[in-house]
Image (cartoon, helix red, strand yellow):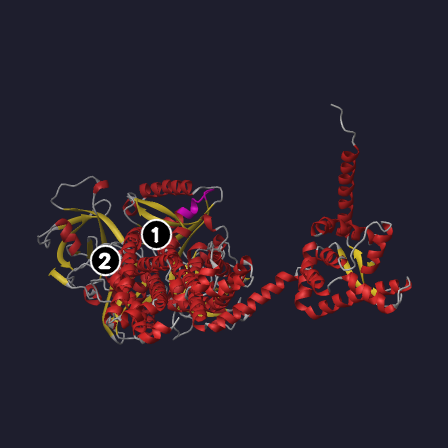
Amino acid sequence: MSVMARLKCVLDGALRRNRMEGDMDAELRFHMAKYAEDLVRSGLPREQAERQARIEFGHLQPLKEECREARGLRFWDETLQDLRYAGRMLRKSPGFAAVAVLTLALGIGANTAIFSVVNAWVLKPLPYANPDQLVVIFSADIKGRWSGNSSAADLDDWRREKKDVFEDICGWLPSAFTLQNGDEPIVGASVNAEFFRMLGVIPQQGRAFTAQEEKPGSPRVAVLSHELWRNRFAGDPAVVGQTIQIDGAAVSVVGIMPEGFHLALMGPVKLWMPLTLTDDRRNRYLPVIARVRSNVSLARATGYLKTVAGRLAHAYPETNAGRSIELRTLREEIGRQGANEEALIVFWLVGCVLLLACSNVANLIVGRAVGRQKEMAVRLAIGAGRLRLLRQMVTESLVLFFMAGALSVLFANWGVRWIAQAIPIEYRGYLPNSAVLRVDQPTLLYTFAIALITGLLFGMAPAIQCGRIDVNHVLKENTARLSAGGRTALFKNCLIVFETSLALVVLVAAGLLVKGLVKMHARELGFDPSGLVTARVVLSDSHYPDPKRIEAFQRNVLLQIRLLPGIRAAAMGNFIPYGGNNGSAAYVIEGRPASPPADRPFMLFDTVSQDYFKAMGIPLLRGRMFSEQDRADSPPVGIVNQAMVRRQWPGQDPVGQRIRWSANLDHMATIVGVVQDIAGQDDNDHTVPQVYFPYQQYPMQGVTIVLRTDAALQDAASGIRRAVRAVDATQVVWRVETMHALIAERRAPYIIMGQISSFFATVSLFLAALGIYGVMTYSVAARKQEFGIRLALGAARRDLVSLVMRQGLKLTGIGLAIGLGAAYGVTHLMSAILYQVSPTDAATFTLFSLVLLLVAGLACYIPARRACSIQPTRALRSE
Amino acid sequence: MSKQQDLLQGTLEMLILKSISLEPMHGYGILLRIQQLSQNRLQIQQGSLYPALYRLEYRGLIKAEWGESENNRKAKFYRLTAEGRRQLKLETENWNRLSAGVVGVLTAEPEKS
């Protein structure tokens, strides 16, 4: 209540000042008049009465001032005064104001932008109901040596046995759909019916899938993303219930998801269709996500599902022996794929950038305050209160910071837009909350508050210092000598050291990240990705129970595809690199003592068509490729990679050796060739032993078509779909992608991180240079007179330049030494996220030390040159 | 001089609150009322009333409105707010307690030792 009264008083006074003054005047006049009337009534002559009233009233001006103060207006008046003065001061030195405001705005803006992204990415809860209960389930080796997708039949069994541990378990399959003939395919996914319910997101219109709809043969239905609905169906609500053409078949739309709904693991999915699970236990291609019941711990859920997996391993030894499961929280998995650690490192490093900006401004403010000691002294001498001076200095800082704050909002917006743009559209879907990538308001406020506190502290420091000013001394001294004084000089020297070391840490950290990225890009893939288009078909067990039929399907599709225009090579594999699936099996070398099952080595395997190596561009190093003669009924053969040779036959020729493989070791193959190592499922795997078999000898339902083609992706896609449809119209082609896109998808987090980190490395280098430049300019200006004397006494300009440079570079050197130590500590924390780069990579450390030294040298050289180019006589006369 | 004013400041405010507790009054009326009630024992400088009035308004204890005075001149009338009424009660109690205490001390018989 009384707060309101106070506010009203101050606001009245502040906003309607004239009226308030008039009121006050009228009130006092009324009082005097009444008093005078009473005096007249008591017998005094009117003239005398009025005089007496005025006298008894006292001096009017101090009284009014007291009244104003009583209404809380004095503070307001003084603030106005300070603001006006601050405005004048800033106008008087526009250079200082511009640099300070820009630096700060850049620091705050960049920090806010990056933190907003990191926040959306890592820190904000996932946009689903109770996201902590969501987990990702992997099929895994019982010893934990690998983990990956699961088979449809396993998933089906898990779903049946979810009991009171899991609320829902859902598999999904990335797919590409074509809406109308000739259209570019859109990213879609097939999901189990409970998928949306499990995430706790309901369609904004219509409904989700029913359990009935995932049964084979039921009418086909689809749920649209908000984006697809808006862009392709003009946001028409009537589309729910309508029939649309998907991949040439009639599908009815049953629902539309709310805006921004997506699952980061799935990518930018725009269309969902029900997933029909087959009884295929051999191919593991389904990512699985589940919701654990709220009262069940992750450990219990893991333990329970492991026993289920154990039962399955026992019941289906051929496919499931040695297999178990692994559970990870969805958050952890998204963080892993979204490079959680990088994001946090970036967060810390960008804090350094803010620190740099703040210290630059601190330097500017302190530097200027020293230059204004004389002004302060004069004002003290003519009676200004020290507290009043302090308040005024603080007001000046505040004005600077509010200007910077306004500008930083603009910068933050640009920054976020820049980062968002730097993230290619196809990656955005892999970021949680990416749909709402915008400046985070609390972050902006928070960052601004930090900058403000710095500003207040450093704005106050000089004013507090002027509390110690010896007025007489200061008034007598000249400005130059004051500013060269010990404490300020120490502060400025420390600042150079601090900024140099901080910038080095940021540069080195960013440098290591970028170097890793460069290395990743330069990675020997072992195959040639250009012009490669891949498509996946997973044959259903019900249609293809018989290996002969699978083989026939593959053979016929290959025949059809070879007829397509622009095809240079066509082949089939199953577990292609960067494809997201792999097959592994235990093996033994024939003729060597067999080790117990648990200790058998694992190999990756793939079943490929004879042109696979040619299509992929994988060179044959020894022996022969597969040929027409390798048929289902011919002796089984295999081709190994170099890693296998290194592991099992170092320095020897493996051709002619025989291996036994699979869980029961009931498959045997003779090695006929050696091919070059190729990249695996992502960039982090190290090349592991791998064996290729001809698909005719081990037909598998999972088929990845690989084309080397000159045709555009969408032509290739429609060609592949036509070819598959011609062979078997019931089979669906999932996801036609270029190999480059598959690789890019896996590399997205690193690429984004590289872009962000190079952005802030540039900013920090700029800020450090600005800081060093500022300090040096100031210290050179302060020594102008000294230089004048030196010049007059015959010093060469060259000597002066080197004198200044020596001073600056000495400090930079100390900064670099400290920075190297700090960077050494920081980069060690990053070792887990660096791609094949040592956290103490000497080249990076050296390179960026040199870069910083160079930039620092330049930042020292320019002011040094300027100071030495003045005329000695003028320098001596100047004050 | 200034010390005496300081001492009076709180007291003056209390007296103002008391005098307008019955009906709204303008500044001059308040001054007269205080002099009348104190039977001219309390002399208040004409102008010194106003800073106190403004301070009370700032604290939300009183409210000011323009109105017509006895002879149809515009004057600013002050009245108590609910909070002002509470404050007056509180201060009156405090004052009574204090003065009773002081009176008690001053009227005590010196103890015989």
Instruction: State yes or no: residue A160 in magenta.
Output: yes
Residue placed under numbered mark 2 in the picture: A607
**Left or right of B60 on screen, residue A495:** left
Residue to which mark 1 is pinned:
A151
Q: Position of residue A800 (x, y in %)?
A: 26, 69
**How many other residues sit within 10 Å of disc 1, few (<14), some (14-19) or many (≥20)?**
many
| Residue A114 is one of the magenta-drawn residues | no
Name the residue: 62% across, 65% down: A77
In the orientation shown, which residue stands out farthest toward the top?
A: B113
On the question of residue A875 being in view, the answer is yes
What type is the residue that disc 2 sits on?
Thr
Q: Which residues are magenta?
A: A158-165
Residue A822 appears at what percent x and percent y? 30, 53
Q: Residues within 10 Å of mark 2 (few under 14, many from 20)?
A: many
> Circle 1 sits in a helix, a strand or a loop, which is it?
strand
In front: A494, or A446?
A: A494
Q: Compute the Cα span from label 1 to label 2.
A: 17 Å
Q: In the rendering, at what x and y percent does residue A560 appear? A: 27, 70
In depth, the one of A797 and A12 nearer the eye is: A797
- Up the image or down, A428 lies above or below B59; here it is below
